[in-house]
Amino acid sequence: MRDVGDTEIGGFGISRKDDLLLVEDFLTAKQTASVVSVEFDDVAVADFFDRQVDLNHSPEQFARIWVHTHPGDCPYPSPTDEATFRRVFGVSDWAAMVIVARGGQSYCRLRFNSGPGGSIEIPVCVDYSIPFGGSDHEAWHEEYKTNIQVKRIVPRGSFDTAFDSVSLCNDAMAGDEDELFEDAGFGFEFDPFDPWEECQCEI
Amino acid sequence: MRIMYINNFGGGFADHIEIEEGTTVSKLFAQKIPDGRPEDYLIRVNRLPASRDQILKEGDRITITPTKIEGAAA
């Protein structure tokens, strides 16, 4: 699911009732996502809660483990991630923020809000001692198409040419400055400035 | 009067509770999440957005969920 699209993907881990840190499923809700951000639809989150309760799941099982992806190879939380974790999940007795980077790295921080409070980074691993179903790429693609509204990132300024895949590490426009300025409807006549020309010292 | 109450505050809750007749949405919110700001939550009754003055009725289902869950790459 992590690699289904070019964007971040956010969702909730569904835990086993008798082992809340054992995530048995990952479910998304409708969201707007780009290569660098993800934002859940508030109504979809409410619908998600209602559906999970109808399935006889307790909030501890479905609303405590916030999982999202980073399309790059850095799994560490951004200031936005931290702010959301504090504001949204800081009111529960406990919560975990899990970030899975496309490069394969992951990050998980378990936060306790009761008592003196505190947080601790914990490792993420696949528990092969528990049986689980196989990959279902078709279902993942369907869920991505249904729930993730892709927000395209366009270059700053008035360029009207969006691009489908952005790599923050490799500047997709590097070396194309002339064409880009041409698209924007203006150009430059480059007049090299020679600082020595007007500021010659007379000795 | 008995209603269904769902939220993720504290230990989390999804069960029936007893409330007084005439309890409004804002009164229940203040009782259950005393330090919370209503604008940080989506409050729905029977899966529909609720106003603060809405009076809860027997059998209603009130869901209080967080808003603006967002993330960003570093």
Image (tube, rainbow, N blue to C red):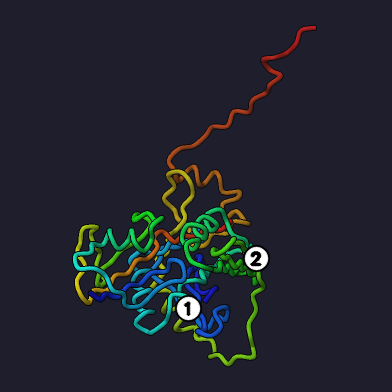
Q: Can you say whether A135 is above or below A111 in the image?
A: below
B19 displayed left or right of A67:
left
- Pointer 1 local density, CA inside 10 Å: few below 14, some 14–19, many at least 20: many
Residue at image location 45% in from the left, 55% down from the top: A162
Residue at image location 45% in from the left, 78% down from the top: A141
* Furthest-right residue in this view: A203
Q: Nearer the viewer, residue A84 or A199?
A: A84
Q: Which mark is residue B54?
A: none
- Is residue A157 at least partly visible in the picture? yes
- Is residue A36 at least partly visible in the picture? no
Please give the residue where the numbered disc 1 appears in the rendered image: A61
Residue at image location 38% in from the left, 61% down from the top: B33
Q: Nearer the viewer, residue A7 or A83?
A: A83
The chain holding disc 1 is A
SS category of the residue bearing label 1: helix
SS category of the residue bearing label 2: strand
Please give the residue where the numbered disc 2 appears in the rendered image: A120
